[in-house]
Amino acid sequence: EDGEREARPKQRLLVVANRLPVSAVRKGEETWQLEVSVGGLVSALLGVNDFEARWIGWAGVNVPDEVGQRALSRALAEKRCIPVFLDEEIVHQYYNGYCNNILWPLFHYLGLPQEDRLATTRSFQSQFDAYKKANQMFADVVSKHYEEGDVVWCHDYHLMFLPKYLKEHSVDIKVGWFLHTPFPSSEIHRTLPSRSELLRSVLAADLVGFHTYDYARHFVSACTRILGLEGTPEGVEDQGKLTRVAAFPIGIDADRFTRALELPQVQQHMRELMGRFAGRKLMLGVDRLDMIKGIPQKLLAFEKFLEENPRWHDKVILLQIAVPTRTDVPEYQKLTSEVHEIVGRINGRFGTLTAVPIHHLDRSLDFYALCALYAVTDVALVTSLRDGMNLVSYEFVACQAEKKGVLILSEFAGAAQSLGAGAILVNPWNITEVAASICYALEMPAEEREKRHKHNFTHVTTHTSQEWAETFVSELNDTIVEAQLRTKQ
Ligand code: G6P
């Protein structure tokens, strides 16, 4: 049977996401330097043997000239990536505007931006038009590379029109769409001027996936309440056509982390870190510098903890890695200065001649440095105000087999549904509660830490990203077979 399997050509999977898993830097007219970034999605698909995956997306750079575009396409082809070229104006209106200034905050319950809610409906409209135009550009590239039998897997809030445009191209394309953010309550989604069009476009997919059962339920009720369609346990039905809706919680490639911890360079780094933080407990935050991550709230909770627990002064350090992101969006710029101000104030207030309580870095770390840091941490603080899943919490757990540190986790992160029994769950808006949890975590007896860690470690190592990707794609294939059977009946 194995032989047969080998001989059969693998099903092609076209993975479409706004951002390619490769970042490109131009080094000359026709030379590009590429760097592969192994995020959740990439590692998920690296381990999937049943498919031959290809990536379609934006390379994150503006390439106005054809020579450059051709050279970049060639370079990317070696990494199985196909670029979608977006010019600066489209990036501004579609990516900075509609995606990151409207959909992203709305889906995380931060509401619509004031200026759009009031006067400038024109800018809302032009951003929405650019969003549709960009989605069309993605659809054109997919159609060009599509071969019969391919599965197309569309990702995230950037591409909600893609299922519709692809089905317009050909009804036979197998289309899945997966949202990596929360899908908010229908009462929130209702406020969006383009609420119906977006829902209808997503419903053109054969299978629609979310990280949690709640998000799936919110989506189905948005479809029933706003579009008047019928919600069933299977999904959403529109005049006999079913769009299947289900939850597929993502995971990580935990082995990649545990293997890294065995490398001599990582162990050396761990020893250095332990030396540097000797005599103090290490608390760690790793977040993109995004308002949904609740960084100011986390800092205020830490301040309150210091205020209330003088015995811990000088005995604990909070290391916050804040990775810069979407820096062209004004909201993100404001957040950066707000965070810096709070860090400065707290360090001024509780610092001594030799040490400060918060060590804040506006940068990312390479994979090995991050693994070392996760491994030597005593308490991880993941206090997102909302978060689709949050894989930092998973990565921390994967690296804690030795130390068995404590995870403080927001109840508004998707991960709270899977790591809830092992983590200390908190409401990140409740500074007093988070401060008390910090104290509890730092003083937790070893026995309780071990029990909690075991629960989470088992989950993280058994619900992997590979399994997630395989389940979604096989469910998509099954959905299509079932639909064909139904139409025959
Ligand atoms: C979130 C989104 C992703 C996105 C990532 C980084 O995780 O769900 O789709 O790629 O943030 O954001 P960026 O805007 O830099 O792609």
Image: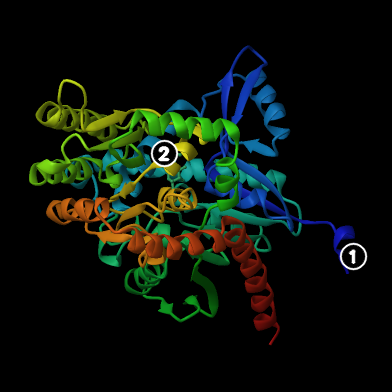
Q: If the picture is divided into quarters, which one holds ligand 1? A: top left
The answer to which image quadrant residue 354 occupies is: top left
Q: Quadrant of the C terminus?
A: bottom right
Residue tagged 2: 94
- Location of residue 279 in the rendering, given as x and y in whole percent from the top left corner: 29, 35
Left or right of 418, for residue 442: left
Q: Which residue is painted at 27% across and 42% down in the image?
A: 291
Q: Which residue is painted at 41% across and 76% down in the image?
A: 229
Question: Relative to 98, is 64 above or below?
Answer: above
Disc 1 marks a residue whose amino acid type is: Glu
Mark 2 neighbour density, 10 Å: few (under 14) some (14–19) many (20 or more):
many
Q: Which residue is painted at 46% across and 56% down in the image?
A: 179
Q: Earlier in the sequence, mark 1 or mark 2?
A: 1
The reply to whether residue 188 is visible in this rendering is: yes
Front-lying residue, 191 or 264: 264
Whether residues under marks 1 and 2 lie with C-beta atoms below 8 angstroms apart, the answer is no
Disc 2 marks a residue whose amino acid type is: Tyr
Dot 2: element: helix
Question: Relative to 260, is 161 above or below?
Answer: below
Residue tagged 1: 4
